[in-house]
């Protein structure tokens, strides 16, 4: 009995998940010391495609930049296929620049007397077809559907073609000799000029021209990427999202902040609001979506209410887990994990920067309290990540027994500001009976003793769909890390 108990305890200890060890992979657009960043170059959206082989970023200048993965191609097959073949891949994931195009331009809404900036707010990948990439990009007013594909480059190989080589394409000139006094064409028309003008054929020498300066176009083996806008959905936000907001939210002060479709059931849609609630909609009931199937919100504690309560409760982003069972939400202070089968409250809460709570007044005065941080889930659903200030981001483990709450910096040395908060292990996601709170920092500064820099903030990041690979946008720089 004793030996068996010790064996069980040892097995449980070995089964406890270990924190991920993050390493720097690569960076695009790295700033040098003292370099001034242009406003139009700041990254405002980032998204992996479904395969993880392509990554798209959008910036405030309305441009979309595409990157493609190269390490899997170098080994002659898809990474998952190579793993099944027991092929060891020692190299870290690598991406390269693929192409870029101007998606949106600044415009003016004359009806509302409002300037519409070109900033890209969201990018969504669509299903690929015939080797072409399809994606949606959106600013404050217009959604555009783009097709990106490779086309063969046509080149001019020669400009001088003699008469014998041109015969294959039809006669170059016609002889003016004819047995008839009035030369006629095959369709019965007459070649004689009705006004007595000399025709071009009759003005040419009887022997024709020995050579003509004609271009010869051939298809080369080179290809170039071409991006074409296939469709434009103008005023899409005005006619759809805002109308939903006015119909369903209880107060004009409550607006929709984020929306996501269920990953496997296209009839289910979830959207969050500025009041800190998430509504789940089944569109089979009504296409208008004026009623919700489930409402997820955390009960408010009256004693803790303050002027900033509603502001920091506003949800800036939501993401479905890959299996669709859980929803991850991010408000200003926390990450919350919701079970769609349990609407009484979140199954877990993760503190992102609780140490900033005493500084809410200062954050309100400099408008930092209105920053919209995004969140993301790993493909296996065992980890989640979100951004913070001083170009830092946090990674949490949500598997059974995990105590992971790691802070990393978007730089070539991500562990420089690492904070590993060891707290009580979390329960498994399924039967969680209560809310677990983990990852709280008690200090008002980072681990180096310096105050947080609210001007440098990491708002946008994306997790690879199948691997532990994170892409983070810090100002105009794109950092990638793997574990």
Image (cartoon, helix red, strand yellow):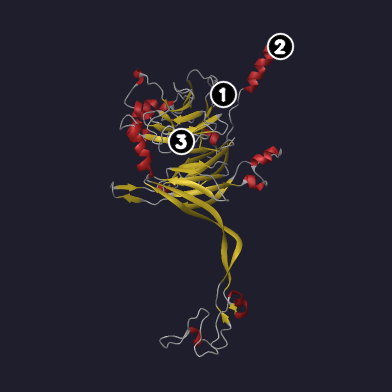
Upstream in sequence: badge 2 or badge 1: 2
Q: Is residue 449 visible?
A: no
Q: Nearer the viewer, mark 3 or mark 1?
A: 3
**Residue 385 seen in the figure:** yes
Q: Closer to the N terminus: mark 3 or mark 2?
A: 2
Residue occupied by mark 3: 260
Residue situated furthest top in the rendering = 1
**3 or 1: tag closer to the N-terminus:** 3
Instruction: Name the foreground residue: 164 vs 360.
Output: 164
Location of residue 381 (image quadrant):
top right
Q: Tell whether 35 sits left or right of 306.
A: right
Circles 3 and 1, Cβ within 8 Å, touching? The answer is no
Query: Are the residues at dot 3 and dot 2 in contact (C-beta closer than 8 Å)?
Result: no
Residue 3, disc = 2
Element at badge 3? strand
> Nearer the observer, disc 3 or disc 2?
3
Mark 2–mark 1 CB contact (< 8 Å): no
In the rendered view, tell whether residue 281 sits above or below residue 62: above
Residue 186 in picture, x, y percent from top left: 53, 80
Residue at mark 2 to residue at mark 1: CA–CA distance:
26 Å
Mark linked to residue 227: none
Disc ID at residue 402: 1
């Amino acid at each position: 009995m004793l030996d068996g108990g010790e064996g069980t305890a040892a097995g449980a200890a070995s089964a406890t998940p270990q924190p991920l060890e993050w390493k720097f992979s690569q960076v695009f657009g790295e700033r040098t010391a003292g370099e001034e960043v242009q406003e139009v170059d700041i990254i405002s959206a980032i998204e992996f495609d479904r395969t993880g082989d392509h990554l798209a970023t959008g910036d405030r200048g309305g441009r979309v930049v595409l990157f493609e993965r190269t390490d899997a191609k170098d080994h002659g097959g898809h990474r998952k296929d190579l793993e099944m073949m027991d092929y060891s891949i020692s190299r870290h994931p690598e991406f390269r620049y693929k192409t870029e195009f101007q998606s949106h331009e600044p415009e003016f809404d004359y009806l509302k007397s409002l300037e519409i900036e070109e900033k890209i707010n969201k990018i969504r990948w669509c299903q690929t077809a015939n080797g072409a990439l399809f994606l949606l990009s959106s600013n404050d007013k217009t959604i555009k559907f783009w097709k990106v594909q490779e086309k063969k480059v046509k080149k001019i190989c020669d400009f001088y073609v003699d008469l014998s080589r041109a015969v294959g394409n039809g006669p170059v000139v016609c002889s003016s000799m004819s047995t008839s006094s009035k030369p006629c064409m095959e369709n019965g028309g007459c070649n004689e000029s009705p006004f007595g003008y000399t025709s071009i054929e009759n003005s040419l020498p009887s022997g024709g021209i020995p050579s003509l300066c004609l271009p010869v176009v051939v298809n080369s083996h080179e290809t170039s990427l071409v991006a074409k806008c296939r469709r434009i959905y103008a005023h899409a936000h005005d006619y759809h999202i805002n109308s939903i907001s006015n119909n369903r939210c209880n107060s004009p002060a409550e607006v929709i902040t984020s929306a996501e479709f269920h990953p496997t059931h296209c009839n289910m849609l979830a959207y969050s609001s500025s009041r800190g609630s998430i509504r789940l909609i089944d569109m089979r009931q009504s296409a208008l979506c004026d009623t919700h199937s489930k409402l997820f919100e955390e009960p408010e504690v009256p004693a803790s209410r303050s002027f900033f309560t509603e502001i920091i409760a506003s949800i800036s982003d939501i993401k479905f887990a890959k299996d669709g069972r859980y929803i991850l939400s991010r408000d200003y202070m926390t990450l919350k994990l919701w079970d769609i089968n349990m609407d009484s409250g979140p199954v877990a809460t993760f503190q992102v920067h609780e140490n900033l709570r005493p500084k809410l007044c200062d954050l309100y005065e400099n408008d930092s309290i209105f920053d919209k941080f995004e969140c993301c889930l790993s493909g296996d659903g065992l980890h989640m990540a979100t951004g913070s200030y001083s170009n830092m981001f946090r990674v949490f483990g949500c598997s059974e027994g995990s105590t992971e709450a790691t802070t990393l910096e978007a730089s070539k040395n991500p562990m420089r500001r690492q904070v590993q908060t060891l707290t009580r292990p979390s329960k498994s996601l399924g039967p969680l009976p209560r809310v677990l709170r983990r990852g709280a920092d008690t200090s008002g500064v980072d681990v180096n003793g310096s105050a947080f820099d609210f001007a440098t903030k990491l708002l946008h990041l994306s997790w690879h769909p199948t691997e532990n690979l994170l892409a983070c946008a810090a100002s105009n720089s794109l950092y990638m890390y793997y574990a």
